[in-house]
Amino acid sequence: GAVVSQHPSRVICKSGTSVKIECRSLDFQATTMFWYRQFPKQSLMLMATSNEGSKATYEQGVEKDKFLINHASLTLSTLTVTSAHPEDSSFYICSARSQGVREQYFGPGTRLTVT
Amino acid sequence: LAKTTQPISMDSYEGQEVNITCSHNNIATNDYITWYQQFPSQGPRFIIQGYKTKVTNEVASLFIPADRKSSTLSLPRVSLSDTAVYYCLVAFLGGGATNKLIFGTGTLLAVQP
């Protein structure tokens, strides 16, 4: 149980275009979802926290107009990277958590490459 | 300032016990400490979680001193497949109702035959 999926696993896009990444909890209801970014050989950095039905809370330094997060249902959250640039190339990982449960379950990650 | 520190890397041989420590001053008093394993280009995988003293499961043990300013992940007998990056995840007071969860800097464990 407690499986989180992400789609796509890899995506290549041209500079200036937008990319949407989906995060789904497959067998539980995720009241809270987290989005992380990980650059090569670095730790995971929290970008934002989203609660179902509410606006996401962004970490300091993360542009909310550039990284649009939607958490419209208890099983799906999306991250849209708008007007992507090469410096947005990174590994994006989501995690999900049920209400009252301490543990986060992580997705497999999405490798974004902006050319 | 919320900060966690881990050794950058560790080397070991198959069959040995490996201990990886994470230093985390000023963590939230009401939250747990969690350790994850990550292979290249994959999401983190849960290893173990604890609040204080010692926790043991089928793959690892976690030692947390009374002051909770550090935690030590112990892998009893490592194998080649344990070569990965290991992260602690701890909570700091977020200034609101929700704690801020921060990953440690990560430790690359290299297991040799």
Image (cartoon, rainbow, N blue to C red):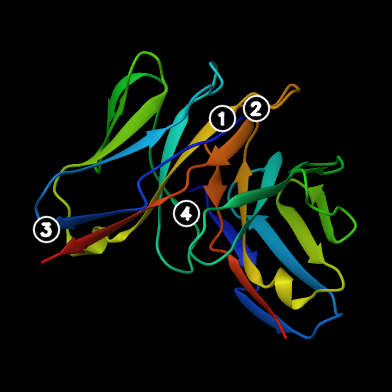
Of the numbered discs 3 and 2, the one sitting upstream in the chain is 3
Separation of marks 1 and 2 at Cα, in angstroms: 6 Å
Q: Are marks 3 and 4 in contact (CB under 8 Å)?
A: no
Q: Are marks 1 and 2 in contact (CB under 8 Å)?
A: yes
Tell me which corner region of the image, top left, top right, bottom left or bottom right, holds residue B20.
Answer: top left
Amino acid identity at mark 1: Ala
Which secondary structure, mark 2?
loop
Residue at the spot of label 2: B99
Amino acid identity at mark 4: Pro
Of the numbered discs 3 and 4, the one sitting upstream in the chain is 3
Q: Are marks 2 and 4 in contact (CB under 8 Å)?
A: no
Against B54, is A110 above or below?
Answer: below
Residue A89 placed where, x, y %?
67, 73
Q: Is residue A42 left or right of residue B75?
A: right
Against B73, is A45 above or below?
Answer: below
Of the numbered discs 2 and 4, the one sitting upstream in the chain is 4
Same subunit under labels 3 and 2?
Answer: yes
Would you call the spot at circle 4 few (<14 residues within 10 Å), some (14-19), or many (20 or more)? many
Residue at the spot of label 4: B44
Q: Residue placed farthest to the right in the image?
A: A65
Separation of marks 4 and 1 at Cα, in angstroms: 17 Å
Residue sitting nearer the eye, A66 or B11: B11
Tag 2 subunit:
B
Separation of marks 3 and 1 at Cα, in angstroms: 33 Å
Q: Residue B91 — which label?
A: 1
